[in-house]
Amino acid sequence: MTAAVAERRSGIAGALSDVFFARPQLLTFLLLTPPLIWIGVVYIGSLFALLLQSFYSLDDFSGVVVHEFTLATYEQLLEASNAQIILRTVLMAVLVTVASAIIAFPIAYYAARYARGWKKALFYLAVMMPLWSSYLVKVYAWKLILAKEGIITWFANFLHLSWLLDGVLALPVIGGPSLSFSYIGTFLVFVYVWLPYMILPTQAALERVPVNFIEASADLGADPRQTFRTVIFPLALPGIVAGSIFTFSLTLGDYIIPQIVGNSRLMIGQAVYTLQGTAGNIPLAAAFTVVPMLIMAVYLWMAKRMGAFDVL
Amino acid sequence: MSPAVRFQNVSRRFGAVRAVDGVSLDIEPGEFFALLGPSGSGKTTCLRLIAGFEQPDDGHIEIFGERADGVPPYRRNVNTVFQDYALFPHMTVGENVAYGLMIKGVGKSEREAKAKDALAMVKLAGYEGRRTAQLSGGQRQRVALARALVNGPKVLLLDEPLGALDLKLREQMQEELKTLQTKLGITFVFVTHDQGEALSMANRVAIFNEGKIVQVGTPSDVYERPKSRFVADFVGSSNVLPPEFAASHGGQPMWTSLRPEKIQIAAKNALVPAACAHAAGTVTAISYQGAVTRITVATDQLALIASTPAETTLRKGDSVSLIWPKSAMVAMGETA
């Protein structure tokens, strides 16, 4: 006959199992401490150091950072040339986010509602595969596509639509000598590169909308358009907001895409890159970095006010 | 007057599966009608056909005399209480209830007043501002009911309405649903796999098996006079007697139903009244079920189950005589 209470397993593993079973908080504590130290010290700590830097200023003559608290650096941000950089970047981020949301939604909706089995696998593959290859390679590939001798120009010629392409490039501000030297090009590449980050959270949110909500809505008299507006979209909104946090903040901070594809006007990321590097103006670079953080904070606060997270 | 719901030879197939197979059925206005059957028998598909979530592959459905073929759910004056209620999580209780009215374009103050009345009707007055996540299962059920009824449907459909509730609450809701239905006079059609629920709530019951209706009738009809072995067995457990056994015990040579509560257990050599049949056997199992005790007795031909209301002094292995009125044997018209 076997005993009702089994012997403790031999060795240290057996003893540890019993200790952790009796004190589950101990295990949680041990598991969480290393990552919390990492986040607390390395992550938040360096962010705080950054914030601190932005309140110092650069001595114009000596080029040395003056370690005294001042708002002078933030005043510099408001100078026309710097304010333009911020405005330009925010505008680009907004447009990229809106375009990503519009393109992503039908794809996410199809994947969440209709794709099953191999179609679903194909969806994940198609959305994720671009993320497997280097971001730089993709951006340079786009440069080739958009360049004056590139695929788009060739294709426009082939379809006898060069006049259309020339017309688009002749547009003020967003046009340029070629797509790869215009805001249009920068915009296209941003949308391409960040699109998966919009599709996946949107799809995850739609996935959690049960079919019987849609049936209940129809049952209560709502046609498909009304159901979309009053049930599907509000329930997908947290996902879209999550996706927009990615597309918006990634666009705000990126300095490689506008460097490779775009005109010579700077975005925030490029400004930070130049200021901390060649110019050695760490305080202004830090102040520039604070801008996207503030914008994101305001954006999230507004999203919360609008009830985007009520369903979470 | 045309029936509230009419099925004319309706079939619905999913791939090779005939979920609903040639069903014809009339549900009269004001009826409390149950669709009863085991899971996968087609009862829920029938409900979805009335709601418009499914369309028939063959046959026609009429709602109050109007052809419903191809009419989408949002153009049917029929509302559904879903099995898991399907309350919208991004709306308050009040907004959920007022949803149908909002869609119809009813003004804010009017729909709020109507939602308030509907909530009061289901005994949830003052719950308008709550989030649905804060409600218990029974309360969600009531909100779902109010949300459907506020639209004044011609037919109310309920999909396993009490399935997720615990026993006590279920019995209470059964009473309330019946009262509500009588008061409103709306046709209620509900789906259930619980025969007790169907018998206690419905005016009439349709029993489904494998996509077909096997019997329609009042609860006492289907319980007292089952027409097939399936019905006898599914609606309350029954002793199903083979034709030979029935014939040799004073019945007809057909498959015969004999309800356990009709059988009396007597001492081995007890006197058998003239109008009764009897069989001798040995007790093989005793199952205490609270209100009744079910006793299995093996006769030399088959095992019979008898239920006695009182506590019993019987023990396993006792030799007993089973006595039942011959009139309690219901021939089901099946000889094979």
Image (cartoon, helix red, strand yellow):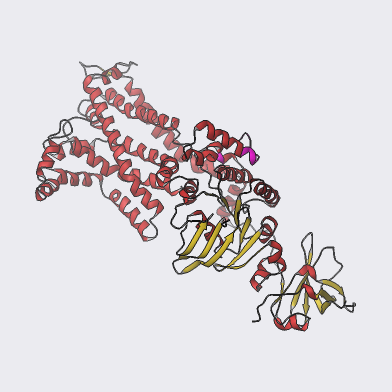
Residue B120 sits above or below residue B245 on the image: above
In the image, A79 versus A173, the foreground residue is: A173
In the image, B70 versus A97, the foreground residue is: B70
In the image, B31 versus B34, the foreground residue is: B31
Residue B177 sits above or below residue B111 on the image: below
- State whether residue B18 appears in this view: yes
- Report the label total: 0
Residue A190 in picture, x, y percent from top left: 25, 40
Residue B103 sits above or below residue B167 on the image: above
Task: Give the quarter of the figure containing the C terminus of chain B.
Answer: bottom right
- Magenta: main secondary structure equals loop
- State whether residue B130 appears in this view: no
Q: Write down the region rendered in magenta.
A: B119-132
Q: Is residue B279 left or right of residue A15?
A: right
Task: Give the quarter of the figure containing the N terminus of chain B.
Answer: bottom right
Residue A206 in picture, x, y percent from top left: 42, 47
Q: Is residue B163 left or right of residue B240?
A: left
Residue placed furthest toward the front: B1
> Measuring 79% from the left and 65% from the top, which residue is drawn there?
B293
> Measuring 21% from the left and 17% from the top, which residue is drawn there?
A62
